[in-house]
Image (cartoon, rainbow, N blue to C red):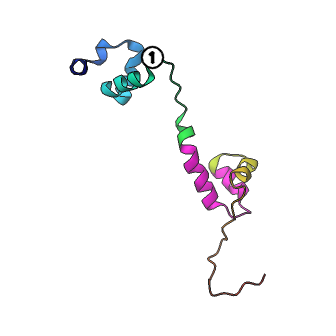
Amino acid sequence: MEDWIKELTTDTIPERYRPIAELIGLENLIKLADYSSGDTLYIPTSEFFLRPIRDQRIRDDYRGSNSHDLAKKYNLSERRIREICEGVRPTPDWDEDENQLKLF
């Protein structure tokens, strides 16, 4: 069957699968079909896969008092920003000098 793949063209597959074939290629479409074994396959939106990166950027930018700005920047609610940053120690806006004595 592997040599049959070489003869496969987008014209020979059902029309409803052609956009996927054009997006990922015919060989990858066959691999995906083999992987799913005919079962329904759910693929979430790209946002689902990118969310951990977004959340880490939010944590990196979190200063404790900038939830409003981060909410605007990432189009989220301030509450969601606080949930993402729960347990995160805010990074100060200035660089701490290791040699400087702490007041408290």
Residue positioned most to the right: 104
Above or below 98: residue 1: above
Classify residue 68 by image quadrant.
bottom right
Image height check: is 20 above or below 73? above
Query: Residue 75 location, x and y as percent?
Result: 65, 46
Residue extent of the magenta highlight: 50-73
**Residue visible at 52% across and 29% down in the picture:** 43
Quadrant that contains the N terminus = top left
Check disc 1 and report the residue beneath it. Answer: 38
Residue drawn 67% across the image and 54% down it: 70
Q: Position of residue 99 (x, y in %)?
A: 63, 87
Q: Is residue 36 above or below residue 62?
A: above
Left or right: 93, with 104 as reference point: left
Q: Position of residue 73 (x, y in %)?
A: 63, 52
Dot 1: few (<14), some (14–19), or many (≥20) neighbours within 10 Å?
Answer: few
- The residue drawn where x is 77% and y is 84% is 103
Percent across and percent down for residue 38 are 45, 16
Overall secondary structure of the magenta section: helix
For the C terminus, which image quadrant?
Answer: bottom right
- Left/right of residue 30 with respect to residue 76 in the rendered view: left
Is residue 98 part of the magenta span, yes or no? no
Label 1: element kind: loop
Q: Nearer the viewer, residue 10 or 86?
A: 86
For the image, the number of numbered tags is 1
Q: Is residue 102 left or right of residue 33?
A: right
Q: Amino acid at mark 1?
A: Gly
Specify the quadrant of the image occupied by residue 37: top left
